[in-house]
Amino acid sequence: MSALKRIAKRAVVETIARAAPVTWKWRKPGSLVVLMYHRVLPKDSPERRTEQPGMYVSPETLDLHLNELKRYFELVHLDEWLRRAKQGAALPRLACAITFDDGWRDNYEFALPVLVKHGAPATVFLVSSYIGTTYRFWPNRLASLLQKSFAERGSVDFPEPLCRLVEPVLANANSRGELAVEDADRAVQEAKGFDEEEIRSLVEIAEKSCGGGSQAAEILDREQIGHMAATGLVRYGSHTATHFRLGGRISSQVLEREIVGSRAALQALCGQAIELFCYPNGETSAQALAVVRRHYVGAVTTRKGWYQAGGDPHLIARIGVHEDVSNAREPFLERLSGWR
């Protein structure tokens, strides 16, 4: 990006950041912004090397966000706000609900202290089958395979058709002498074009070709989940049983396992009513939506925007906030505006 373009972009961001809080005063009562977080990783965390840039903030950035949010919004539990809206009860004029997807261990290590500092309520969406295990999500495993293949050429045998996807990425990295985080991110985004069962199988085959994958524990365990709940700030929702993407045609057995079974498992494990659902990768279908409506008070998507009382509570838009677009006050407020 040229210097002139950077200056112009910064000017746009600063203008929107100044204007946004003013325009919020004109929003209808019952306006809600739901923020979407995933991971909270310190700046020196080695886990950033296998994580997509849009998946994390630092603890310092989360602290900055909460300082700003408390200036303009009432921080609320999402399930409680939805129940009040359904009952026609009084709602805050402007409210914000914080959500974390996937149930990462770093939510306990690095997010929880910041939430406690600010007294900020949050919902963590858990993948029920992975709690307390060493399972790694396939995007992180694919990023690790790319790093290994770049460092030791020929060490990973990528099966077709995954091979056709990763070869250009690795060739480009080899020509530059560096595998950037953006290279792995591009490969992961393209790999989402495979259906869920296929990409998991392809990654597993590639891992077996080089002796298996990492067994580091990255997911919350039962004790950590209990400690978070004991603060009174953290509530839980379902993010399916196995992080199975729910777009397209899916059998009734899979829908029962991922949507209904995960809720029952989490209620038994967490000791809470599980009233909220989160669609993996934001993908859903008419069949999945119908099942979610029968079993949950509300559900969140990855669609960008604010939510208004009276909208569809099972297709709630959110605003994703992550380090590279919200690590200072102005870009955070610009992001929060939902205008771009």
Image (spheres, rainbow, N blue to C red):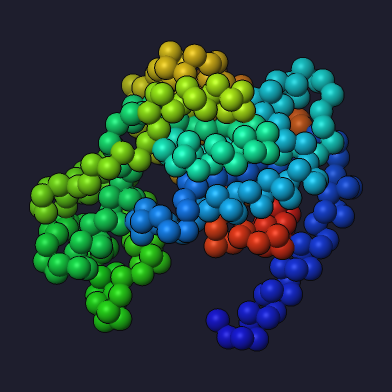
Q: Position of residue 288 (x, y in %)?
A: 47, 29
Considering the image in quadrants, where does the N terminus appear?
bottom right
In front here: 290 or 103?
103
In front here: 152 or 2?
152
State whether residue 200 is above or below residue 153. above
Is 18 placed left or right of 213 in the picture? right
State whether residue 88 is above or below residue 40. above
Question: Can I make out residue 279 in this image?
Answer: no
Is 228 placed left or right of 314 in the picture? left
Residue at figure coordinates x 56%, y 38% from the top left: 113
Considering the image in quadrants, where does the C terminus appear?
bottom right
Question: Can I make out residue 34 in this image?
Answer: yes
Q: Position of residue 285 (x, y in %)?
A: 48, 35
Q: Position of residue 18 (x, y in %)?
A: 81, 63
Q: Position of residue 201 (x, y in %)?
A: 21, 43
Residue lying at the far right of the rendered structure: 26
Is 260 placed left or right of 172 in the picture? right
> Within the image, what quadrant is residue 172 found in?
bottom left
Is 297 placed left or right of 44 in the picture? right
In front here: 182 or 340?
182
Q: How many marks?
A: 0
In front here: 17 or 196?
17
> Within the image, what quadrant is residue 132 found in?
top left
Residue at figure coordinates x 55%, y 45% from the top left: 37
Residue at figure coordinates x 36%, y 56% from the top left: 46
Residue at figure coordinates x 55%, y 15% from the top left: 273
State whether residue 49 is above or below residue 119. below
